[in-house]
Image (cartoon, rainbow, N blue to C red):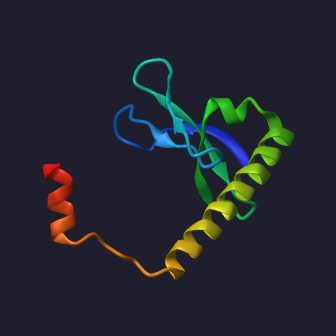
Amino acid sequence: MKIVWERSIYAGNGRVPCVICGGWVTPIQRKGQQVLLAVVYNDRGQIYGEICRSCLSLGAKGIKEYLRERIARLRRQLQDLEELEREEVQLPTLEQELSAYLD
């Protein structure tokens, strides 16, 4: 993984998601209208996304550790969702829904 400061390719000064933590990346305004983002490339030179300043400040080891922790959380979440997906979906009847509104 390689991280490089580059001019934003997005219109305006909007936020984009951080590829590391999932939070928001706020572009940095430089002289004039120039807006910079820290862009993450994989080893093949493909853009993976942008990284926020909080994640960037973790340093190389911190970023790797954060990614390991996030991957573990996402795997647990995926297991929970797969368990739910295997179960039958039981929706409330129209009578139950109306009763909930009227009670």
Q: Nearer the viewer, residue 1 or 91?
A: 91
Q: In this image, 85 relative to 14: left or right? A: right
Let me know if residue 1 appears in the view.
no
Q: Position of residue 99 (x, y in %)?
A: 17, 58
At x 16% / y 68%, what residue is drawn?
95
Hey, which residue is sitting farthest right in the picture?
A: 61
Q: Position of residue 67 (x, y in %)?
A: 74, 50
At x 52% / y 72%, what residue is drawn?
84
Please count the marks in the image: 0
Q: In this image, 62 relative to 81: left or right? A: right
At x 50% / y 77%, what residue is drawn?
85
Q: Nearer the viewer, residue 24 or 96?
A: 96
At x 57% / y 38%, what residue is drawn?
6
Q: In this image, 88 relative to 60: left or right? A: left
Let me know if residue 68 appears in the view.
yes
| 70 over 85 or under it: above or below | above
Q: Position of residue 25 (x, y in %)?
A: 53, 36
Hey, which residue is sitting farthest top in the picture?
A: 31
Q: Position of residue 101 (x, y in %)?
A: 16, 51
Q: Nearer the viewer, residue 68 or 17?
A: 68
- Res 15 → quadrant: top left
- Res 12 → quadrant: top left
| 64 over 59 or under it: above or below | below
| 92 over 72 or under it: above or below | below
Q: Nearer the viewer, residue 5 or 62?
A: 62
